[in-house]
Image (cartoon, helix red, strand yellow):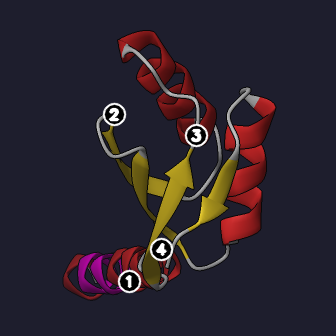
Amino acid sequence: MKKIVIPAIALLMMLILSAAANELSGETIETTFAVGGMTCNSCVSRVGRAVAALDGIEKISINLRTGRVAVVHDSSVSADTIADAIIRAGYPARAAN
């Protein structure tokens, strides 16, 4: 009896983990933003924190010299939502791609 129960429990765990993995593996998008007004590393930190606070953000790359912010995010997060977060942090932003 135990041999039947253990594989059934293992199968159930695999199904649960598989469902969770499918939910987490949503499509990701990389969006680049042109951000104005960043003049120092504190600006970079402020923009980074504003974007990182959003759900669905996977990676943020900020280039102070070019004023570009590249964000890898879940497809459920719109470019407008990210741009709004940057704007609320005090920097003009628009999607560049």
Give the residue at mark 3.
36
Secondary structure beneath label 3: loop
Give the residue at mark 1.
18
User: The magenta stretch spans which residues?
Assistant: 5-12
Q: Disc 3 versus disc 1: distance between alpha carbons? A: 42 Å
Q: Is residue 9 magenta?
A: yes
21 above or below 44?
A: below
Secondary structure beneath label 1: helix
Q: Residue at 43% across / 58% down in the picture?
A: 71
Residue 81 image offset from top left, x and y in percent: 76, 59
Residue 26 image offset from top left, x and y in percent: 49, 82
> Residue type at mark 1?
Ser
Q: Using a 10 Å C-alpha cutoff, classify the residue at mark 2 as few (fewer than 14 neighbours), some (14 to 19) or many (20 or more).
A: some
> Residue type at mark 3?
Gly
Q: Residue at 75% across / 65% down in the picture?
A: 80
Q: Disc 2 versus disc 4: distance between alpha carbons? A: 37 Å
Label drawn at residue 85: none
Q: Earlier in the sequence, mark 3 or mark 4?
A: 4
Quadrant of the snapshot with the N terminus: bottom left
Q: Closer to the observer: label 2 or label 4?
A: 2
Pointer 3 and pointer 1: residues touching (CB < 8 Å)? no
Q: Residue at 67% across / 34% down in the picture?
A: 91
Q: Does the magenta stretch include residue 10?
A: yes
